[in-house]
Image: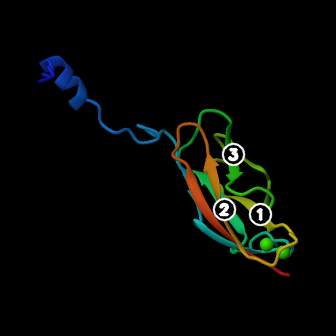
């Protein structure tokens, strides 16, 4: 028969470990106009077209330059311009227009992917993108 001993200190240590979110104490937030976008393969995007224009700004005034990076869950299906959202203490609250463009591919299947926006001190924001195929 095996006996497992758990000291009071060890038990308390186990109880004192809460599940931490990605950022336990976010100091920044990434604000987008919508977490769902829809683009058409090869069709381009006119700035201001809400379907393909992702508006991004920061929720808190930073002390210096802040880069919001954007990564796609699937490579090669969309491009976005500009590739990085650049903010500073002056422009942080002003929407930047990120144009999402569907790239031409050889298949005739629609694609669904996500763009993940990240910056230090903020929880990631995930935007779902549907690409309508034109073939
Ligand atoms: Ca295609
Ligand atoms: Ca396709």
* Quarter where residue 24 is shown: top left
Answer few, some or many: residues within 10 Å of disc 1's Cα (few below 14, many 20 plus, some between 14 and 19).
Answer: many
Disc nearer the start of the sequence (2/3) = 2
* SS at mark 2 in the image: strand
In the image, residue 10 sits, relative to residue 66, either above or below, namely: above
Instruction: Identify the residue position indicated by label 1 in the image.
Output: 99
Q: Give the colouring mode of the picture.
A: rainbow
Answer few, some or many: residues within 10 Å of disc 2's Cα (few below 14, many 20 plus, some between 14 and 19).
Answer: some
Q: Which mark is residue 69?
A: 3
Horizontal side, residue 74 vs residue 42: left or right: left
* SS at mark 1 in the image: strand
Screen quadrant of the N terminus = top left
* Quarter where residue 52 is shown: bottom right
Q: Residue furthest front?
A: 1
Disc nearer the start of the sequence (2/1) = 2
Q: Nearer the viewer, mark 2 or mark 3?
A: 3
Are the residues tagged 2 and 1 within 8 Å (C-beta)?
A: no
Front position in the image: 128 or 118: 128
Mark 3 Cβ and ligand 2 under 8 Å apart: no
Q: Residue furthest bottom?
A: 135
Across and down, in percent, residue 25 comes to 42, 37
Across and down, in percent, residue 133 comes to 79, 78
Across and down, in percent, residue 103 comes to 84, 67
Q: Tell me what residue is drawn at x 69 percent, y 50 percent.
A: 70
């Amino acid at each position: 028969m095996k006996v497992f001993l758990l000291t009071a200190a060890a038990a308390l240590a186990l109880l004192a470990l809460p599940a931490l979110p990605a950022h336990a104490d976010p100091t920044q937030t990434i604000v987008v106009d919508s977490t769902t976008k829809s683009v058409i393969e090869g069709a381009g995007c006119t700035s201001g077209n809400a379907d393909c224009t992702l508006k991004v700004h920061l929720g808190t005034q930073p002390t210096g330059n802040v880069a919001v990076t954007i990564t796609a869950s699937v490579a090669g299906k969309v491009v976005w311009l500009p590739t990085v959202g650049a903010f500073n203490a002056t422009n942080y609250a002003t929407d930047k227009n990120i144009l999402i463009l569907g790239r031409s591919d050889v298949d005739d299947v629609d694609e669904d992917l996500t763009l993940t926006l990240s910056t230090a001190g903020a929880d990631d924001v995930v935007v779902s993108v549907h690409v309508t195929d034109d073939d």
